[in-house]
Amino acid sequence: MTRAWRQLTLLSLAELLALSLWFSASAVLPALKHEWALGDGGSAGLTIAVQAGFIVGTLASALANLPDVFSARLVMTVGIALGVATNAALALWASSLGPALVLRFATGVFLAGAYPPAMKIMSTWFREGRGLAIGILVGALTVGSATPHLVRGLTELPWRTTLLVASALALGGALVVQLFVADGPHRFPAARFDIRMAAAVFSARGPRLACLGYLGHMWELYAMWAWIAVFLGASLDASGGDSYSGLNPSGATFLVIALGAFGCWAGGLASDRWGRTTLTMISMALSGACAATIGLTFGGPPLLTLLVAAVWGITVIADSAQFSTAITELSSPAYVGTALTTQTCVGFTLTMVSIWLIPPLVTRVGWQWAFAALAIGPALGVLAMGRLRALPESGKLAGGRR
């Protein structure tokens, strides 16, 4: 194994462990709804608070050029460690929705240091095969996001203990970064603080269209991840079934989200071989079709529902890394970290709207049609990436493979 691939393995492990913090509260939501008598607004708020915190964290990071002015490894280590502290505080001391929202918001702020800097570090190790490398990294993020559902699916731990397990895993991720991760030989030029660079990603056509494609993707992704567990539980109840081929709803949710890691790997390979725009357009078309149709399986045979959800889980994330990879190829080299952080910030701002939208849609039109609203994002994303494909700038993608 080459040093670059060893670093990819270590950084992916760290990302997997760190991102167990993201959906830790969502995984224990049934217990919190019962104990704290949460309604739909409070339930959605616990997920949206993390997104909001992440947005504030990435915005501050982009405005300050943190991933470019400071060591990306240091930013990662500090961000993960502080996220561990706030998630543990929720487990140990929170007893109502208000403090929980504050702590989830703070966790999101600190997780801004765990994700974009990792993509920058990985880009310093890979020029060829960068799409695959960042795809594997995002695959690790995907499995990490699903890990709390696995803990709930396999154990009967109290919700506070489940959160502490997630914090312990993330602390391990911080240690991996601090002790074993390093920058690669293809380092980006040193940068000076320049607040204007936070918006520079939108000033050129190529990066702007890549960001618009990313926005279409993000409209769908986190709303699907946030509510698929509730959908699978409600569908199983409506069908009168007792399991998804032996899996309870938590276990099925872990499977659906974690299968996205395979999608990230396959998407990275396909993107490097056939082109960034080709892969992203195909992936968004498939995931959008799943969003539009999965509701038709609601209350039907559990195996059919699980099958469509699994295909959705694979395709909804298969293109995610390639939008980020495109930004590293189209942006000013000295401010790649800032461009990635700005892209991420805007994308996660949009997720707050789509996450909030699902519960009222369920009330109005039922689960049969609620997820169909998410198909709008990938449809628009396909149009944006199609326009990018037609530009001369797209020749910079994947060594000329558009």
Image (spheres, rainbow, N blue to C red):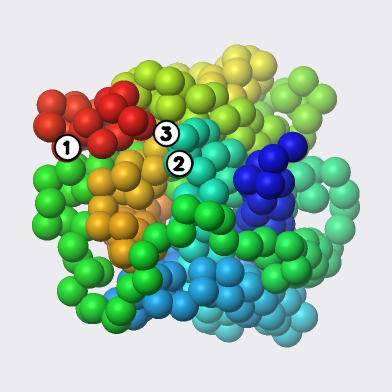
Say few, some or many: other residues with alpha carbon within 10 Å of mark 1 (under 14 / 14 to 19 / 20 or more).
some
- Nearer the N terminus, badge 1 or badge 2? 2
Q: Position of residue 133 (x, y in %)?
A: 54, 39
Q: Identify the residue position indicated by label 2 in the image.
A: 127
Q: Is residue 167 visible?
A: no
How far apart marks 3 and 1 lie (CA) works out to 19 Å
- Nearer the N terminus, badge 3 or badge 1? 3
Q: Identify the residue position indicated by label 3 in the image.
A: 319
- Nearer the N terminus, badge 2 or badge 3? 2
Rendered image quadrant of residue 17: bottom right
Mark 3 and mark 1 in contact? Answer it, CB < 8 Å: no
Labels 3, 1: front one: 1
Amino acid carrying label 2: it is Arg
Residue found at x 70% / y 71%: 178
Q: Give above or below for 137 relative to 334.
A: above
Instruction: Determine whether the residue tagged by mark 1 lies in a helix, strand or loop.
Output: helix
Amino acid carrying label 3: it is Asp
Rendered image quadrant of residue 314: top right
Instruction: Determine whether the residue tagged by mark 3 lies in a helix, strand or loop.
Output: loop
Amino acid carrying label 1: it is Glu
For residue 393, the mark is 1
How far apart marks 1 and 2 lie (CA) works out to 18 Å
